[in-house]
Image (cartoon, grey):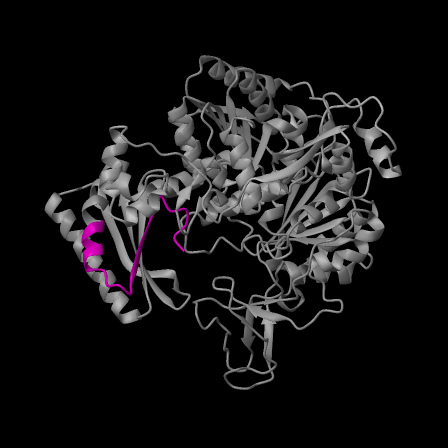
Amino acid sequence: RLREAHPAAVPLKELEKEGFGAALKKMTASERIAYSLRPALGGPKAAHEWWLGQAAEPPASPGRLGRKEQALWELVRGGPAKPMSYYASYLKNPLPQARSLTAKGLTSLDRRETFRDDPGRAIFSENRPAPPPTREQAAALAQIEAALESRRHHGFLLFGVTGSGKTEVYLRAAEKTLAQGREVLWLTPEIALTLGLEGFLKNRLGSEKLAVLHSALTPGQRHDQWLRIRRGLAPVTLGARSAVFAPLENLGLVVVDEEHDPAYKQDDGLRYNGRDLAMRRAREAGAALILGSATPSLESCHSALAGRLTLIKMETRTGEARLPQVEIIDQRQEPARQRKALSVQLQKRLGDVLARGEQALLFINRRGISNLPMCLACGEVMKCPHCSRTLTLHGPDRPGPAAEGAAEASAAIGAAAGSAHDAPAETLVCHCCGYRADPPKNCPKCLSPLFRYFGVGTEKLLKLAEEKFPGVRAGRLDADAARRKGGLKKIISAFASGALNLLVGTQMAAKGHDFPNLTLVGVVEADLGLNLPDFRASERTFQLISQVAGRAGRANTPGTVLIQTMNPSHYALTAAAAHDYETFFKNEINIRAELGYPPFARLALARLTGPDESRMMRLADEAGEIGRLILRETGEAGVELLGPAPSPMARLKDNYRFQIMVRAETVSSRRAFLTLWLPKIRAVLPSWARLTVDIDPYHLL
């Protein structure tokens, strides 16, 4: 039937719809039929470009040539064939002249497949010679290169302070891997970090050897980058978490930079952790694995101490750079009415730095202008009608600065920053579902005119800095400012080139960037994340503050970090201020052990969502009872159910959410329980409800 119905190759999806699924598996296994990967119909297609070169035997006397024909012939004659884009940089629209020269027998014109360029275009693209390795770098490389020589899997945790030269270790290990004829997978947590790394890798490893994969590429660009990797044309793949699926067949080295970062975890759709998948790929390929961080995750550090990873420490910065001096500003000492987003100490230091011609970074992990719209008369807080979340006040969306020179940049900074100059009306936005509303002048509930907006985000912080320091060249780096195509690159480039001297940013600005003239970092509302109902809240706060502090003083000029907080004695903040990971680790690991959280347990989070709150509550209770019955019947002592309970974000996009956490001692006991439990939940799950399961959840929100 298959041969009669489909004599030519057809997509597998069509055959499966016609009921050939089982037959396909059997016949493919017996090699009676074969399949191959092809671009999807209607998807991105290969790009082509005209190439022009001298004909094999051009006539000795070409006859009379026009002015543009003669100019094009001079460019072509005696050289190899080149794409028309090359000639277009010398002559406007040279294709008609190319066709004329080809008709006269002087040239050959053919259409060839080409690869669309990626949008990164290497922010830091100057060709620098490789610096000699430091003593710590040489010691680290000796261990990693020995593992590469063995061609067997070996995992390393490269624990290096910010500015210690971890990137140079990655680069030299990549060079060694390429010399062995094998491939490299290099992951970063943020697309922003690939923009700077791309230039370094192209200069050191060769531009033709590098492919870049991340979600900011167009479908056509992703198609071409994937195809280059698949054909073996690009043995080095750089990208964010989705690059872990790159079709590398001869993997020799896997690098996971900033391995602790939560951005490696995908929380919707296909749920996975890019770091964990990279570890699995390295193990199955027999490749060397480097997990690098200045603030390793507790799980990775625990694995290294247990001997499952080899721990390599790099405790000093390269060159003359030193770790910045960190001061904690106790805002409780300020009178409540005089308390401001920028404390008196931070304002003074910021003014001194700008006056010296140096750069500063103000960090706050919150977007927008204000996150608490509230009535002072009745206490009403304006929330999203579809989610359990307050609305955030935002200014207008603006593109990033178009110019890289200081003169042009200063005129464009307001646009990049979301400044209020000549701005249209502000908007209230829900950061969960995207709901938008006009900000009311009076309270929607009691109609009082005492409706105010409290809290500070990146937009308001930028405006405060511009008002306090007239003439400052300031920009904003957050998800809103970087949304438009090319905006992210323009903002980072402007700050790297000195066109901006002040950057206000969220966690996008906190990690991986190297700005030599950045000497002051101010952390505003440092304890924002400490009170979240999540077992990783302290760890994430420590990591964020340590990472953003590490942006200061990375060259010869000493750096300073000021941390503003209402909780100055919290161990996460005091450890970050002292650059003391070991003390933080000891405090946090003891708490995790006492409460039974990773790395001392393996978690799975089952979440039930639906539009009816009472029915969802009953369904969640039933799912919990089914699970406890299974535990009683099987006598599984290593598994525990917590819940059901409403999720911390109890309502999202008009759906109510209840969750049950599975806590198990081992992966095998967790798998055995889920194998019995989940099918029984799905058997009673109505069509209007949804069950999602997150294995090893990064947060519980």
Magenta region includes residue 682: yes
| Residue 666 seen from this side | no
In this orientation, which residue lies closer to the viewer: 278 or 495? Answer: 278
Task: Report whether 294 appears left or right of 588.
Answer: right
Query: Vertical placement of 299 versus 136: above or below?
Result: below
In this orientation, which residue lies closer to the viewer: 51 or 124? Answer: 51
Extreme-bottom residue of the structure: 447
Which residue is found at the position 60% from the left and 29% from the top?
167
- Splitting the image into 4 quarters, where does residue 375 fall? bottom right
Image x and y of residue 581, in percent: 52, 36
**Residues in magenta?**
678-701
Extreme-left residue of the structure: 633
- Splitting the image into 4 quarters, where does residue 552 fall? top right
| Residue 553 seen from this side | yes
Image x and y of residue 70, in percent: 86, 33
In this orientation, which residue lies closer to the viewer: 674 or 572? Answer: 674
Image x and y of residue 530, in percent: 49, 53
Image x and y of residue 213, in percent: 54, 39
Task: Report whether 158 appears left or right of 117.
Answer: left
Query: Vertical placement of 303 versus 438: above or below?
Result: above
Which residue is found at the position 14% from the left and 52% from the top?
629
Query: Vertical placement of 171 versus 619: above or below?
Result: above
The quadrant of the rendering that contains the N terminus is: top left
The quadrant of the rendering that contains the C terminus is: bottom left
Magenta region includes residue 2: no
In this orientation, which residue lies closer to the viewer: 362 or 506? Answer: 506
- All told, the count of numbered labels is 0
- Splitting the image into 4 quarters, where does residue 198 fall? top right
